[in-house]
Image (cartoon, rainbow, N blue to C red):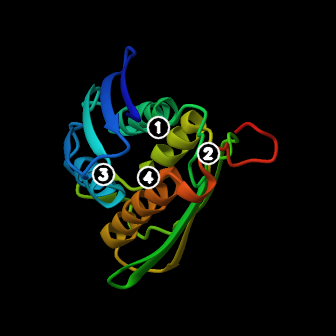
Amino acid sequence: MRTAVLNRTTTETDVSVTLNLDGNGESAVDTGCGFLDHMLTLFARHGRFDLTLNCVGDVHVDYHHTTEDIGIVLGQAFACALGDKRGVHRYGSMLLPMDEALILCALDLSGRAHLQYALDIPTQKVGDFDTELTKEFFLGFVRSAACTLHLRQLSGENSHHIIEGAFKAFGRAMKEAVAIDVAHGNEIPSTKGIL
């Protein structure tokens, strides 16, 4: 079972995550931010991950700490569930259309944290969610999961569509990267012997 159960408590947030990499895309997400709940539900569905995620955060301030800390804990959960990454595909990519938006997501479970972020979101908010926090989520994730992630917007005008396309593409690319590569058995997918 490639699963993880994690909790992280700070003076700003209390985050709990249960993750199953080999699930059916079932999720129960409560972050205190409706838009972020929607994005994480889409991520789980398109990645076919079973995800339970709860966060009690200082949303009376704004959603910054909540969004960043969820990225951190979710990245830690993936790192824990993947272990030494033996047998996985390692790489994943998706070119995803969301109406007028077209989003490219490519990732490598490299053991090296890097985010190449090129989303040009035209509005400052979607609902009450600050759109600049999209980058903060992905930064938190890649630093904790120790992966390389490229997100690039090839077209798009609607802020909701751009961000939704990014989360869906991320889920699909992650699904491909964490999948077991039956052709290569139980190998670590690196000539270095470690990721």
Looking at marks 3 and 1 on the same chain, the residue that comes earlier in the sequence is marked by: 3
Q: Position of residue 149 (x, y in %)?
A: 60, 55
Residue under label 3, please give it. Answer: 44
Q: Are marks 2 and 1 in contact (CB under 8 Å)?
A: yes
Residue under label 1, please give it. Answer: 78
Q: Residues within 10 Å of mark 1 (few under 14, many from 20)?
A: many
Tag 3: amino acid: Ala
Q: Position of residue 36 (x, y in %)?
A: 28, 48
Looking at marks 2 and 4 on the same chain, the residue that comes earlier in the sequence is marked by: 4
Q: Which callout, 4 or 3, points to the residue nearer the camera?
A: 3
Q: Secondary structure at mark 4?
A: helix
Residue 147 has which mark? Answer: 2
Query: Which of the 4 image quadrants contains residue 168?
Result: bottom left
State which quarter of the image contains the C terminus: top right
Looking at marks 4 and 3 on the same chain, the residue that comes earlier in the sequence is marked by: 3
**Residue drawn at x 26%, y 34% as measured from the top left:** 53
Q: Is residue 182 above or below residue 158?
A: above
Looking at marks 3 and 2 on the same chain, the residue that comes earlier in the sequence is marked by: 3
Q: Secondary structure at mark 2?
A: loop
Q: Position of residue 21 (x, y in %)?
A: 38, 43
Looking at marks 2 and 1 on the same chain, the residue that comes earlier in the sequence is marked by: 1
Q: Is residue 60 above or below residue 40?
A: above
Measure how far apart labels 3 and 2 are at the Cα level: 18 Å
Tag 1: amino acid: Phe
Tag 2: amino acid: Cys
Q: Secondary structure at mark 1?
A: helix
Measure how far apart labels 2 and 4 are at the Cα level: 17 Å
Q: Are marks 2 and 4 in contact (CB under 8 Å)?
A: no
